[in-house]
Image (cartoon, grey):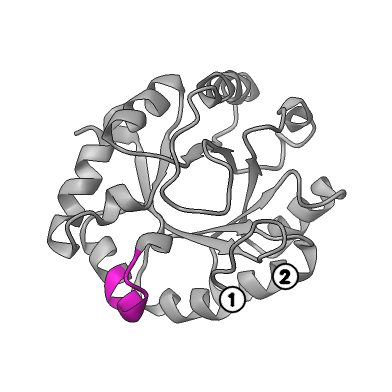
Amino acid sequence: MPGNVKIAPSILSADFAGLGAEVIALDAAAADYIHVDVMDGHFVPVITFGPAVVKAIRPVTTKPLDVHLMISPVAPYLADFAAAGADIITIHAEATPHLHRALQMIKSLGKKAGLAFNPGTPVEGLANVMDIVDLILVMTVNPGFGGQKFIVSQLEKIDKIRRMIDRSGRHIDLEVDGGINNQTARQAIAAGADVLVAGTASFNGGPSHYAENISLLRGV
């Protein structure tokens, strides 16, 4: 599987003063997705990006924009992020009481629908939306800050979701986000992940090292 693993560098770790140039460098370094962590200061403690940033970086890359909405309420903002150029819109199971409706809305906007689970959230309800999701995101840190330590107990959750995906017969990305480095990447891949979100590990050493960093995370 390592050669098939997709890497989604999180621009949360980029140099914000030159964000467009950073995205161009990631594109040239063979990143598979560009991961955009949207935080609202309510659902999570930090405030980061809005639709304007997605719109600003959309013209500088052809790679899919993987937009992770750590916001609540989420439904009122889906159309704005879709219009800004998101390709994948991931929402949190904990962020809305109307999960199926919100996922349907993403699909109706012509986008891929992702569903994220915090470390303490069980995944039993996932069975009710397996027919509509295109990506499932397992948080291996508590969302809100970069640079946290990988929560090893989430490997069991990754394995469980991998088996659910395989039984479904559908192509669904299994993405892991939080504390990903060259060591934890191997653990996540072994548990069944096929997309890795990496911030610090992608950006270490500056643009001249991005291709090497991404290759190492991918395991090839």
Q: Is residue 13 above or below residue 123?
A: below
**Residue wearing tag 2:** 77
- Range of the magenta residues? 14-22
Looking at the rendering, which quadrant does residue 193 occupy?
Answer: top left
Q: Is residue 8 left or right of residue 151?
A: left
The question of residue 103 being in magenta is answered with no
Q: Amino acid at mark 1?
A: Pro
Q: Is residue 90 left or right of residue 16?
A: right
Which badge, 1 or 2, comes first in the chain's sequence?
1
Q: Is residue 204 above or below residue 157?
A: below
Q: Residue at x 56, y 21 (%)?
A: 166
| Disc 1 to disc 2, C-alpha distance | 9 Å
Q: Residue at x 49, y 39 (%)?
A: 175
In the foreground, 148 or 195: 148
Q: Is residue 192 left or right of residue 41?
A: left
User: Few, some or many C-alpha atoms within 10 Å of disc 1 (few <14, some 14-19, many ≥20)?
Assistant: some
**Residue wearing tag 1:** 51
User: Few, some or many C-alpha atoms within 10 Å of disc 2 (few <14, some 14-19, many ≥20)?
Assistant: some
Q: Amino acid at mark 2?
A: Tyr
